[in-house]
C-alpha cells in the first residue's frame, strides 16, 4: 500500500458545533476540505495505530464518496481495522453500539442528522470516541485548532472498497470489514425489551403501529425489528426506503415535517402508537391516537416507568436532561429520590455521566432520549420503550400521559425557532439579552416575577471541565422559564431557539393548548429579545 502525503491549505471554518461539523455539501466538496478535517481529527488523536475505526453514515448525498476518501486517509494513518456498515450505512445509535461492542478506538459518523440532504443541502461528520459517544469539547476544540494550521494529509493508494459486499478483506496491515448495518443493533434491542410480549401484543392486534422513517436511515432498522422480528405489517412503516435527498424533505421528526403521520394519528381509527425518527436515527417523535407527546414529557414518562422494562427493572441510577428541556423529569427524579443533572444542549455532555454510572436515562427537548445502552440518543429504542410500556400497562398513550400529569403535574412547554437569521442580527439579539441579565432579577411582568437571569455555564462533575455560554436562562418565581440560545447545527445564518415552559399542578387545567397557556411568556420573550422587531418576522418558522 503506497502512502502519499498531499500538500493542502487550511480552511478557517471547520469548528464543530453541537454535533459535529455540518456544512453544505458544496462546502465539503471544495478541494481538500473533507480530507483536511479528517486528517485534523487523526492528527489530534493518539495511539491508534493498529486499532479499529468504525465508519458509517445516514446515507445522504455524498455519503458513499466521502467514505471512500475517508477509508484511504484512515488506511494511510495506520488504523489496523475499518468496520463499515453495509452500503456505508449506520444509524448514529447503531454506530455507537458497534464502537462499544467491537471495542473500537472510535468512529466517524457521516451525517447532518435532521438537516435536509442532496447536492445543494447539508453534509456532516462527527467523531465518536471509544465509549461510543460524541467527542467532548476538549477533542473538538483540538480538531478545530489543528484544522487552522494543517498543511498536508495522508492518503493510501488503493482501489475503492466494495461497500455492499459483507465480509472481511486484508490489504497488507489493514483489515476492512463490511458488516450488516442492523444485526448487532437489533440484538441489543432484543436484550433490553420484552420482545415476546411485544410480538404477542402486535400480532394479536392489541397494539397497532405507524412508523415514519422519513426516507432516512431507520427504514432498514424498522423493517428488521418492527416487521421481521415483532410481526408488524409492512404498511405500518411509511417512507421506509432511505433516499439520498430524503425525498426532498427535512428528515426532522415533528408535527410539521412528519405531517402524514400527524394526519393519520389525529384521524378516526388512528393506530395505538405513531412514531418517527430523523435523518440519522437518533431522534424520536412519539404520538398516540389523538395525542402528541412533547419530548420533555416523554423523557419524564419513560423515567417514571422505566422499572417496567426488563433492562431497567432495578430502577435508575439517576437521570439527566439538557438545560432547555422542561423540568418534568426533575419531578420524577425527586419522587424516586434519584439525582437529576442539567447539562448543556448536545449529547456529548451526557457521556461522562453515563460512563460514571451516575445516570441511566437522559434526554433533550429536541426529540432525543437515550440510556446507558449506547452513548447517543436512540430513536428506535425510544419507540420500543413506548411499545413495551403500552404492552405492560395495557393503557393507551393518552391515558399514560394523563395519568402522569395527574401524578406529577404538567410542565406545559413549547419551543419557537427563528431560522436563518442574518448572523449579525442574531448576535445582536444575544448581546441585547445579555445586557439585561443583571437588572432582570426581581422585576415583575404581570404574574411573572424574575427569580434569576443568567447565562448557563456547566461544570462536568466527572472531569471538572467547564463549558460557558450555553444559553440564556430566565427563571420565574412560579417555576416558569424562558430560555434563549443559538443553534449549533444549522448551516445558513443563525437560528434562534426560544424555549418556554410553565408548570400546572391542577389536573383540571391540563388539557389546554400550550400556545394559549404560554401566550404571556411568548409576549414577554419578544419584549426581552426583540427577534420580531429586529428581523421583521411575524412568527417563528417552526413551533414544536
Ligand atoms: C439541536 C438540538 C440538540 C441536539 C442537536 C443534535 O442542536 O437542539 O438538542 O442535541 O440538534 O441533534 P442545536 O444546537 O441546533 O439546538 V441531531 O439529531 O441533529 O444530531
Ligand atoms: Co439526529
Image: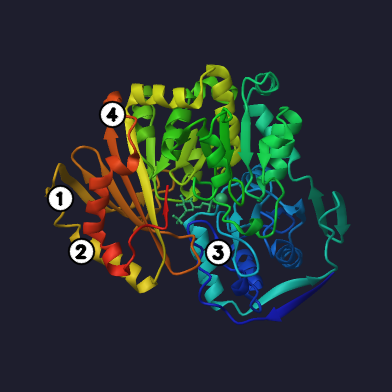
Task: Tell me where residue 88 appears, x and y as whole percent.
Answer: 74, 55
Task: Tell me where residue 361 appears, x and y as whole percent.
Answer: 49, 34
> Residue 119 occupies which quadrant of the picture?
bottom right
Mark 4 neighbour class, 10 Å CA radius: few under 14, some 14 to 19, many 20 or more: few
In the image: residue 66, left or right of residue 357: right
Mark 1 neighbour class, 10 Å CA radius: few under 14, some 14 to 19, many 20 or more: some
**Mark 2 / mark 3, whichever is N-terminal:** 3
- Residue 208, placed above or below residue 420: above
Query: Secondary structure under badge 1?
Result: loop
Task: Tell me where residue 91 appears, x and y as whole percent.
Answer: 65, 48
Colour setup of the view: rainbow
**Mark 2 / mark 4, whichever is N-terminal:** 2
Q: Is residue 382 visible?
A: no
Q: What residue sits right under mark 4 in the picture?
A: 509
Q: CA distance from mark 2 to mark 4?
A: 36 Å
Residue contact between numbered discs 3 and 4, judged by CB atoms under 8 Å = no
Identify which residue, 254 or 48, lies in the foreground. 254
**Mark 1 / mark 3, whichever is N-terminal:** 3
Q: What residue sits right under mark 1 in the picture?
A: 441
Q: What residue sits right under mark 2 in the picture?
A: 435
> Residue 276 occupies which quadrant of the picture?
top right
Mark 3 neighbour class, 10 Å CA radius: few under 14, some 14 to 19, many 20 or more: many
Please tell me which residue is depicted at 26% across the width and 46% down the height of the picture: 519
Q: Is mark 3 within 8 Å of ligand 1?
A: no
Amino acid at each position: 500500500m503506497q502512502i502519499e502525503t498531499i500538500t493542502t491549505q487550511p480552511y478557517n471554518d471547520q469548528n464543530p458545533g453541537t454535533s459535529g461539523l455540518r456544512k453544505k455539501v458544496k462546502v465539503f466538496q471544495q478541494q481538500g476540505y473533507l480530507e483536511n478535517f479528517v486528517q485534523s481529527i487523526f492528527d489530534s488523536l493518539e495511539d491508534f495505530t493498529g486499532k479499529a475505526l468504525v465508519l458509517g453514515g445516514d446515507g445522504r448525498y455524498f455519503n458513499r464518496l466521502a467514505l471512500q476518501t475517508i477509508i484511504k486517509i484512515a488506511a494511510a494513518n495506520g488504523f489496523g481495522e475499518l468496520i463499515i456498515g453495509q452500503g456505508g450505512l449506520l444509524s448514529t445509535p447503531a454506530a455507537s453500539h458497534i464502537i462499544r461492542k467491537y471495542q473500537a478506538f472510535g468512529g466517524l459518523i457521516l451525517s447532518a442528522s435532521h438537516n435536509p440532504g442532496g447536492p445543494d443541502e447539508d453534509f456532516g461528520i462527527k467523531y465518536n470516541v471509544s465509549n461510543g459517544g460524541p467527542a467532548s469539547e476538549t477533542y473538538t476544540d483540538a480538531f478545530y485548532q489543528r484544522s487552522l494550521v494543517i498543511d498536508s494529509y495522508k492518503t493510501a493508494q488503493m482501489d475503492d472498497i466494495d461497500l455492499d459486499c459483507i465480509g472481511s478483506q486484508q490489504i497488507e496491515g489493514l483489515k476492512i470489514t463490511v458488516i450488516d448495518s442492523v444485526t448487532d443493533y437489533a440484538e441489543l434491542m432484543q436484550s433490553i425489551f420484552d420482545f415476546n410480549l411485544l410480538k404477542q401484543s402486535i400480532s394479536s392486534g392489541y397494539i397497532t403501529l405507524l412508523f415514519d422513517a422519513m426516507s432516512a436511515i431507520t427504514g432498514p432498522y424498522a423493517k428488521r425489528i418492527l416487521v421481521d422480528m415483532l410481526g408488524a405489517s409492512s404498511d405500518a412503516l411509511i417512507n421506509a426506503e432511505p433516499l439520498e435527498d430524503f425525498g426532498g424533505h427535512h428528515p426532522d421528526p415533528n408535527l410539521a415535517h412528519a405531517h402524514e403521520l400527524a394526519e393519520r394519528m389525529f384521524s378516526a381509527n388512528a393506530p395505538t402508537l405513531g412514531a418517527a425518527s430523523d435523518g440519522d436515527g437518533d431522534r424520536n417523535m412519539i404520538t398516540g391516537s389523538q395525542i402528541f407527546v412533547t419530548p420533555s414529557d416523554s423523557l419524564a414518562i419513560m423515567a417514571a416507568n422505566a422499572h417496567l422494562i426488563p433492562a431497567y427493572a432495578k430502577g435508575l441510577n439517576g437521570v439527566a436532561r439538557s438545560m432547555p428541556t422542561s423540568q418534568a423529569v426533575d419531578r420524577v427524579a425527586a419522587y424516586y429520590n434519584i439525582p437529576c443533572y442539567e447539562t448543556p444542549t448536545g449529547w456529548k455532555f451526557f457521556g461522562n455521566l453515563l460512563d460514571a454510572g451516575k445516570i441511566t436515562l437522559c434526554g433533550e427537548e429536541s426529540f432525543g432520549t437515550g440510556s446507558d445502552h449506547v452513548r447517543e440518543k436512540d430513536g428506535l429504542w425510544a419507540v420500543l420503550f413506548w411499545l413495551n410500556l403500552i404492552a405492560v400497562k395495557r393503557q393507551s398513550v393518552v391515558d399514560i400521559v394523563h395519568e402522569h400529569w395527574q401524578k406529577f403535574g404538567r410542565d406545559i412547554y413549547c419551543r419557537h425557532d427563528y431560522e436563518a437569521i442574518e448572523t449579525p442580527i442574531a448576535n445582536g439579539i444575544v448581546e441585547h439579552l445579555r445586557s439585561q441579565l443583571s437588572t432582570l432579577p426581581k422585576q415583575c411582568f404581570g404574574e411573572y416575577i424574575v427569580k434569576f437571569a443568567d447565562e448557563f455555564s456547566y461544570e462536568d462533575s466527572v472531569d471538572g471541565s467547564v463549558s460557558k455560554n450555553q444559553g440564556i436562562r430566565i427563571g420565574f418565581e412560579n417555576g416558569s422559564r424562558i430560555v434563549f440560545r443559538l443553534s449549533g447545527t444549522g448551516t445558513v445564518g443563525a437560528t434562534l431557539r426560544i424555549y418556554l415552559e410553565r408548570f400546572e399542578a391542577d389536573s383540571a387545567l391540563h388539557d389546554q393548548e400550550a400556545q394559549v397557556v404560554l401566550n404571556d411568556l411568548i409576549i414577554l420573550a419578544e419584549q426581552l429579545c426583540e427577534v420580531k422587531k429586529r428581523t421583521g418576522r411575524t412568527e417563528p418558522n417552526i413551533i414544536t
